[in-house]
Amino acid sequence: MTDVAHDPVDAPVGAPGPLLRASGLVKDFPIRGGVFSRTVGFVSAVAGVSLDVDKGETLGLVGESGCGKSTTGRLLLNLIPPTMGEVLFDGQDISRMKGKRLAEMRRRFQIVFQDPYASLNPRKTVGATLGEPLKVHFGLDQSAIDERVADLLRTVGLAPEHTNRFPHEFSGGQRQRVGIARALALEPELIVLDEPVSALDVSIQAGVVNLLQRLQDDLGLAYVFIAHDLSVVRHISTRVAVMYLGKIVETGVRSELYEHPAHPYTQALLSAIPLPDPAREKGRSRILLTGDVPSPADPPSGCRFRTRCWRKRELEDAGVDTSACVEQEPLLEIRPSSEVDHPVACHFAKQQAVV
């Protein structure tokens, strides 16, 4: 499969609408085999993802490992090119921007990676790491760079004296704060946070999440918060999108999705979150998913979740015809007939209150 080429049509800068809009994103990675390493198939990592992010809000992107969350995050910032689809940032198509034009746009959106140690150059001091983008993009002299670096370190809760330290001299939580400071250096409007706290101890996670919320309040930032920990996503997100095998299967405002999930996969994920009340925790029933996640190189027909869907099995046991699950791919849409008031991709969507 080859990339779809087209001439991007840009809206005026500052056009009304969401800050970021992705439409029909697809990313296929080739599978190579044989003596000559020919392409023998494709892994469909992202299979038609569409989402919006408004200014100053946080979109939580959740799902199991391998569902395509991180690939989606990189597609949103044009770190990897899409096979199909487009990404509009402030009305401009950035999905196929290159060269100087893309470099200028990159000031406005940044990323914080999961592993703070792997994403920092071990041979550079923190001062050099934070100062490099300031010199490249703003052309500041060394005195102005030093002053700005000190401000950035204070902003993320580190001391200006840390500027001459190397990454190995920091704890994991401190290294992630350095990564956040690097993302803030160019004063972006949107930051993609790719599992920013999953590599940290639980005792450190709260401090980093609180820092992110404070920065959002102070600077008006928009976030795409990628995570598999739904309890963290609930704490920080405005809206939530749930991914399974390369597709978004449910999306909605945080309170609605967490309190009344409609997709069987979302309900299974939420049932695994421990409740703080021991009595409620003891009395609840968990939804256990059986079987393995299908290969993205050969996804099931129709609904991709059907091979592990507990609701499909319940309906079949009750004599309900579930052939639509096999034959038709469910669209991500609001289904008034099932009394679901947020988009969900399930033929038999049914809201379920969280016990």
Image: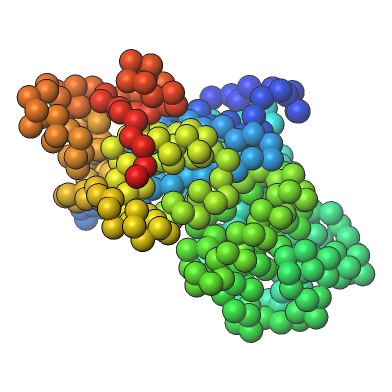
Residue 323, horizontal then vertical, whole percent: 14, 23
Residue visible at 78% across and 76% down?
Answer: 159
In this orientation, which residue lies closer to the viewer: 290 or 76? Answer: 290
| Residue 321 shows up from this direction | yes
Residue visible at 32% across and 49% down?
Answer: 271
In this orientation, which residue lies closer to the viewer: 141 or 289? Answer: 289
| Residue 46 shows up from this direction | no
Vertical relation: 142 (above or below) 91: below
Residue 220, horizontal then vertical, whole percent: 74, 44
Q: Residue furthest top?
A: 337
Q: Is residue 163 left or right of residue 143?
A: left
Q: Is residue 265 left or right of residue 82?
A: left
Residue 215, horizontal then vertical, whole percent: 72, 54
Residue 192, horizontal then vertical, whole percent: 59, 49
Vertical relation: 272 (above or below) 182: above
Vertical relation: 275 (above or below) 22: below
Residue visible at 32% across and 20% down?
Answer: 338
